[in-house]
Image (spheres, coloured by chain):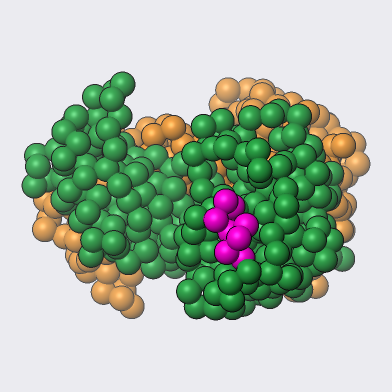
Chain colours: A orange, B green
């Protein structure tokens, strides 16, 4: 069997104390098969976002050690920050990357959720594709009122956790665990300082106002540069390809006589999303990912490991 | 130090006998650190082309074993085929891929050439970037008249080998070893059966008739499909990017009212060549290869190996 690869992007409620951040991240450096791609602490949000990729088992082992460190050092009663949260370990999504499908990641999320509760004592909610109650697909439903409200409301049946007794962990709160598709943070910068244009284009392209079904987006000013930006999350890049988003925005911008200045991918992106868009622009026929030297090499290394 | 990666594309004068082909390829499966990406035997050419990628040392070790097998089983006196050749092991180019520059590959080619001669007794010529005589940059100069002519002409000073006595190996001939840039085989198919159009466009785009300096190309008919093709080698994809070739051909095709039907990458391509073209079309700003999950993973694995 080919090596299974998943991504995991755990979010922790600590973005300020460097020693705590390092203690949380340390297990991800230590487990072979778990690769720490990136971690970003935001002081205003008081939140840490970690990007991992690797094989399911070592990632889960490292997550448990990391969660125990977070539980030990973070007290939600004393936590303040600009980002909604209900737990010291706030959210853990599992994302299929290679030789793994969504069903596989849902299984991982649910079994990991049970293990997580057993080893930390923290109650667990399942969200997105791993949700056990349909209304819990949305993170905002689970996090409503944040830690402060959940402390008391957790005893109500509609807010009972999916794993564990209906009782908040006094310092570490609760944790949301799930499975979702890979999310691409994608921005298109417009050659105008007129924020109205960026907002109108965001409305045309995003699902909430009738645009592409898997695009979320807002219009922002980039004041230092005299530009504006359509800032987006592409939540299903297979259904809403990057090239389609770019060309739709280009088309809309023509109405305003505004040039498309540049685009930006923020953070990670899977090779497939890029190859798909390149194939569109270059009209590439019959191209396979194994023709890319680096991807062939990665696939071969995966096989070697299993010998 | 980060893991050095090279490509190597040895060519052998055997495209028909399956047992010989397997004996030649077998060492490339056996050396850890040498990855056999692909091998293609052509019966008409009576030639085998192998694609390897990996670290310089194991690739060189495997090449020696493979050359000894080829020397043992191929007799140039009895070899016939449509492709020019002077040796059982005809050509061995080393190509820099990652954490390696052209200077490094030239050093590898020259030291490997000396080892190759020592272990096989076959005389060696250096070509392209590794050439010791300027006129030997071109393979066609070294291979002039093929094995049959070189047998006697090798004694002339202008045809003396770069390593070894001026005497052909009676059955294995001589071998050309060198360093070159990565070559992309790239085709653009045109929505016309008029071969004249493909030939005119090939002339406009290729260096030999005044087009882009690092593009070689010809016009061909794809008779089964009623199409024609501009069939190219991009010999320096950093200087002549794929998107520039595609858009130049699209522009030329307009003169004939001919649509660009599709493009094809034949064989391997480095990720950098694709990302560069994608960045053009999508106007991607500030994008780094480590943002691609798979490339980040490959880079991290390289580092792990050295711990």
Left or right, B285 with respect to B113, comes to left
Image point (35%, 55%), residue name: B216
- Which of A178/B101 is in front? B101
- Which of B148/A2 is in front? B148
Magenta segment, principal secondary structure?
A: helix
Q: Position of residue A51 (x, y in %)?
A: 66, 54
Q: Which residues are magenta?
A: B147-154
Left or right, B125 with respect to B121, comes to left
**In which quadrant is the N terminus of chain B drawn?**
bottom right
**In which quadrant is the C terminus of chain B drawn?**
bottom right
Image point (39%, 40%), residue name: B264
- Which of A7/A278 is in front? A278
Q: Quadrant of residue A279?
A: top left
Is residue B217 visible from the viewing direction of this image? yes
Q: Position of residue B248 (x, y in %)?
A: 23, 55
Rendered view: B234 above or below B46: below
Q: Position of residue A260 (x, y in %)?
A: 24, 59
Is residue B284 visible from the viewing direction of this image? no
Which residue reaches farthest right? A119
Left or right, B49 with respect to B288, comes to right
Left or right, B220 with respect to A139, comes to left
All told, the count of numbered labels is 0
Is residue B152 highlighted in magenta?
A: yes
- Which of A227/A251 is in front? A251
Is residue A60 highlighted in magenta?
A: no
Image point (80%, 72%), residue name: A19
Image point (66%, 43%), residue name: B77
Q: Position of residue A305 (x, y in %)?
A: 83, 42
């Amino acid at each position: 069997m080919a090596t299974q690869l998943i991504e995991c992007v755990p979010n922790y409620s600590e973005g300020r104390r460097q020693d705590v951040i390092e203690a949380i991240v340390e297990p991800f450096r230590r487990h072979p098969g778990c690769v720490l791609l990136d971690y970003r602490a935001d002081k205003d949000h008081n939140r840490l976002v970690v990007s991992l990729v690797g094989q399911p088992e070592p990632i889960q082992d490292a997550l448990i050690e990391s969660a125990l460190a977070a539980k030990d050092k973070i007290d939600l009663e004393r936590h303040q920050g600009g980002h909604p949260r209900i737990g010291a370990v706030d959210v853990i999504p599992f994302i299929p990357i290679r030789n793994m499908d969504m069903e596989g990641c849902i299984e991982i999320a649910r079994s990991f959720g049970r293990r997580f509760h057993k080893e930390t004592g923290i109650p667990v909610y399942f969200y997105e594709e791993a949700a056990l109650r349909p209304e819990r697909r949305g993170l905002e439903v689970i996090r409503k009122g944040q830690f402060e409200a959940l402390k008391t409301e957790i005893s109500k049946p509609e807010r009972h956790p999916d794993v564990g007794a209906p009782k908040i962990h006094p310092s570490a709160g609760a944790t949301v665990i799930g499975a979702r598709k890979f999310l691409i943070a994608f921005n298109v910068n417009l050659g105008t300082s007129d924020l109205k244009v960026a907002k109108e284009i965001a409305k045309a392209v995003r699902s909430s106002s009738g645009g592409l079904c898997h695009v979320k987006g807002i219009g922002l000013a980039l004041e230092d540069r005299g530009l504006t930006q359509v800032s987006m999350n592409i939540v299903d890049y297979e259904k809403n390809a990057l090239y389609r988003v770019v060309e739709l925005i280009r088309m809309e911008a023509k109405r305003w006589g505004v040039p498309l200045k540049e685009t930006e991918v923020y953070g990670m992106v899977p090779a497939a999303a890029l190859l798909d868009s390149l194939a569109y622009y270059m009209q590439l026929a019959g191209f396979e990912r194994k023709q890319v030297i680096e991807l062939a090499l990665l696939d071969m290394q995966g096989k070697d490991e299993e010998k």
